[in-house]
Amino acid sequence: NVPVQVSGLSGVTAIAEGEFHFVALRSDGTVWTWGYNSYGQLGNGTTTAGTLPTMVSGLSSGVVAISAGFYHTCALTTSGSALCWGRNGSGQLGNGTASSSSTPRAVSAPGGIVQIAASLGVSPSTVSRALRPETAHLVRPQRRKQIMDLAEKQHFSPNAGARMLRKGMNATLT
């Protein structure tokens, strides 16, 4: 097992791994994906797997962070907004629906997000999270206990759930 250069990618500043897909952030703020794609987690408008990196639809610049979940992917922009795409059966995309998307969709959360994280650890239905600084409560609190109980049963740390933190927050899922 010898590492090899990913064909067609240069200037990569970050990389993330989902269950069977990969995401790369280039220094120009573009996001590139490849791998399994049955839920649209590659963000290229299709559900066809890709063996070579392709740029995510609509993210031609301005992305500062990426994260990959089981079958979904998220990106954070310079403006402090988050976008997610892929499987959404349990609200992973944070857009108020349960419909999967093969292109990026805005996360319905207060602005000023400075960190994103999507989880592989708890289950494929782990939901991306946003915290409100004025209350430090989860935007979807009804799912919090269920996810934390599942994490405990499977011996994952309480912080294994996905989260998004607003500027100035030091809160975590505990």
Image (cartoon, helix red, strand yellow):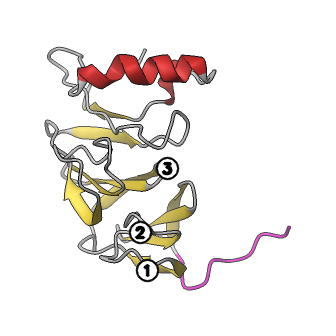
Name the residue: 16% across, 38% down.
109
Mark yes or no: residue 147 visible.
yes
Q: Is residue 150 magenta?
A: no
Name the residue: 49% across, 24% down.
159
What is the magenta range?
A: 1-10
Asked if the residue under mark 1 is in contact with the one under mark 2, i.e. CB atoms within 8 Å, the reply is yes
Of marks 2 and 3, which one's residue comes earlier in the chain? Answer: 2
Type of secondary structure dominating the magenta stretch: loop
Look at mark 2 in the image and give the residue it sits on: 42
| Disc sitting over residue 19 in the figure | none
Task: Describe residue 48's horizontal placement relative to residue 58 as left or right.
Answer: right
CA gap between label 1 and label 3 equals 19 Å
Element under label 2?
loop
Q: Residues within 10 Å of mark 2 (few under 14, many from 20)?
A: many
Q: Residues within 10 Å of mark 3 (few under 14, many from 20)?
A: many
CA gap between label 2 and label 1 equals 8 Å
Q: Is residue 8 magenta?
A: yes
Task: Residue type at mark 2: give it.
Answer: Leu
Above/below status of 64 relative to 31: above
Quarter of the image where one finds residue 5: bottom right
| Disc sitting over residue 54 in the figure | 1
Task: Describe residue 14's horizontal placement relative to residue 55 as left or right.
Answer: right
Q: Which quadrant of the rendered structure holds the C terminus?
A: top left
User: How many dots with numbers?
Assistant: 3
Q: Which quadrant of the rendered structure holds the N terminus?
A: bottom right
Element under label 1?
strand
Of marks 1 and 3, which one's residue comes earlier in the chain? Answer: 1
Look at mark 3 in the image and give the residue it sits on: 70
